[in-house]
Amino acid sequence: MRVNARFEGEAEQQLSYLAEATGLGVSEVLRSSVQHYYDQIRAQRSGLTHFAAFVGRGRSGRGDVAGSYKARLAEGWGAKYQYQGHAPLAVHEPERPWPAPAKTPAGAKTSASGGGA
């Protein structure tokens, strides 16, 4: 595509500065500028802003989705991966003792306490 454009005043100074500072010709500075602007606009329109067009559009029939999404995710993942017992720990959770120590009733004597027969 061939383009004719008139740059005057500040825009002309900016274009001249960019050409001099980069060592590129005016046409290449303009091509680079269009590429940079294109990349910037694409980044704004993609990602979450694009995804936002779909959020909240479905009708699940549930009124508690926003307040219970974590429980629903855990339930769904548990069913998918069929965790037995405890689900795997999250990164921020301390490690559980494995297997869990048996709890003894209060006041019960154990062999370690010296209460043998």
Image (tube, rainbow, N blue to C red):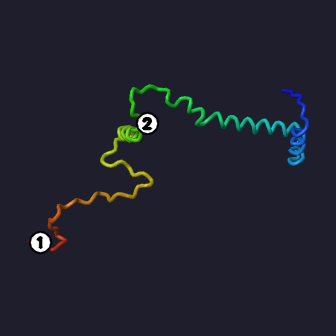
* Up/down of 113 relative to 38, above or below: below
Q: Which residue type carries mark 1?
A: Gly
Q: Which residue type carries mark 2?
A: Ala
* Up/down of 117 relative to 70, above or below: below
Does residue 81 appear to the left or right of 8 in the view shown?
left
Numbered circle sitting on residue 70: none
Numbered circle sitting on residue 66: 2
In front of the other: label 1 or label 2? Answer: 2
* Up/down of 73 relative to 105, above or below: above
Does residue 88 appear to the left or right of 109 in the view shown?
right
Taking the spot 39% from the left edge, 34% from the top edge, the residue there is 64
Residue 5 in picture, x, y percent from top left: 88, 30
Q: Which residue is mark 1?
A: 116
Q: Residue furthest left?
A: 117
Residue 59 in picture, x, y percent from top left: 44, 25
Look at the image and tell me in which quarter the C terminus lies. Answer: bottom left
> Marks 1 and 2, how far apart in space?
57 Å
Does residue 32 appear to the left or right of 58 in the view shown?
right
